[in-house]
Image: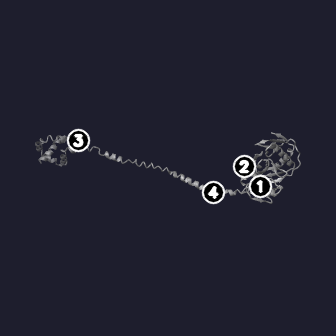
Amino acid sequence: MGLFSFLFGKKKKQAPQEPLPQEKTVVKSPVEEPKPEPKPEPKSESKPEPVVEAKPEVKPAPQLKEEPKPKPAVEVKPEPVVEPKPEPVVEVKPELKPEPKPEPKPKPAPEVQVAPEPKAEPKIEPVQPEKPAAAPKPKAVGKYEVYPEAGLFKYRLKANNGEILVVSGGYTTSAGAISGIDTFKKNVMSGKFEIVADKNNFAQFRLYTPNGSRLVASGEFYETVKRAESAMESVKKFAPSEKIVELEEIPAEEIREELVVCNPVEKKPNGKFEIGQSEGQWIGVLKASNGEVLFVTSGYASKSGLLSGIETIKKAIEAHNFRVAKDKQGRWQFKLYSAINQILLVGETYGTKEAALSSIESVRRFAPDAKQIDL
């Protein structure tokens, strides 16, 4: 008990100081305690009673045993060495989740270049239907029909759909018309095509011999030059056909040309032939006294050739070798044939048959005595 009271008495002395509960004071107290150790014995024995009261405080006694050891006091300081700090540091480092960022690098996902692959697929598909598209070649068959009309024999070229592309001039026999088909084919290959628009702005193509001296055939009349050009291309496409059909007659509604009965007319000297060059060829234009265009000749390589052609035309006019014809547009025009049934010229187009017949009378009045004017 002496030792216990000694120890306890020592605590008793320190109690009034109250720095013990604070950890900082505890550290300092043990440093001073070793010096007064020989003095406390008489004082501690004089107060035995308070020792009993201190029994419940035995719990801190073990702490006193540790107090003489300055080491634990020093150990208290390292505790505030914010040991948790290293913990967050370690946690942050593993959170180097930027490493998965290289995953976005495989943004080859935009390699959705696979999208163009379907585009290539449809390109391959249309290639297959193109093969049957080559089949239209056999479609360009067409046919020629030889038939009687207006006292002569003619041939006409038809497309596969039955559309009439061109009608020939007249021949005295069916054999002559068939022979004319061969001539037509040759001139389609080597002859001269022209697109002509009349004063009413209706256009047609005309086929001449290579030197332009003779009209071989003329096409239908169309509202525009573009359509006349399209018809010309169709003729080139179907002309090689070898199919020829001979007809004894054609339906009345398909008759295009009629003979003309010419009555006597009074000739007038105030008509005129205007002679000039156009696109390197010589042509003649017959005009009435009022300036109305009655017809335009074919082109000639020279002026002398044109003058000779005009004389041939005048003779055919005197012989009344006229016919009137209508095309599929329902427009009428006259045609003048030579003594051997070749077409010498065609007139302007008119909306009615009567107007076409009236133009024939005007030609008969003004052509024979028309004055020649060089332009």
Instruction: Decide which of 115, 33 is in the foreground and name it.
Output: 115
What amino acid type should be assigned to the residue bearing mark 2?
A: Glu
Residue matched to label 1:
182
Q: Nearer the viewer, mark 3 or mark 4?
A: 4
Identify the disc placed on residue 24: 3
Report x, y in % for residue 343. Answer: 81, 50
What amino acid type should be assigned to the residue bearing mark 4?
A: Lys
Residue matched to label 4:
131
Q: Is residue 3 left or right of residue 169?
A: left
- Earlier-in-chain disc, 2 versus 4: 4
Secondary structure under tag 3 reads helix
- Earlier-in-chain disc, 1 versus 2: 1
How many marks the image carries: the answer is 4
Judge the density around disc 2: few (<14), some (14-19), many (≥20) Cα neighbours within 10 Å: some
State if disc 1 and disc 4 touch (CB < 8 Å). no
Instruction: Give me the C-alpha separation between circle 4 and circle 1.
Output: 33 Å
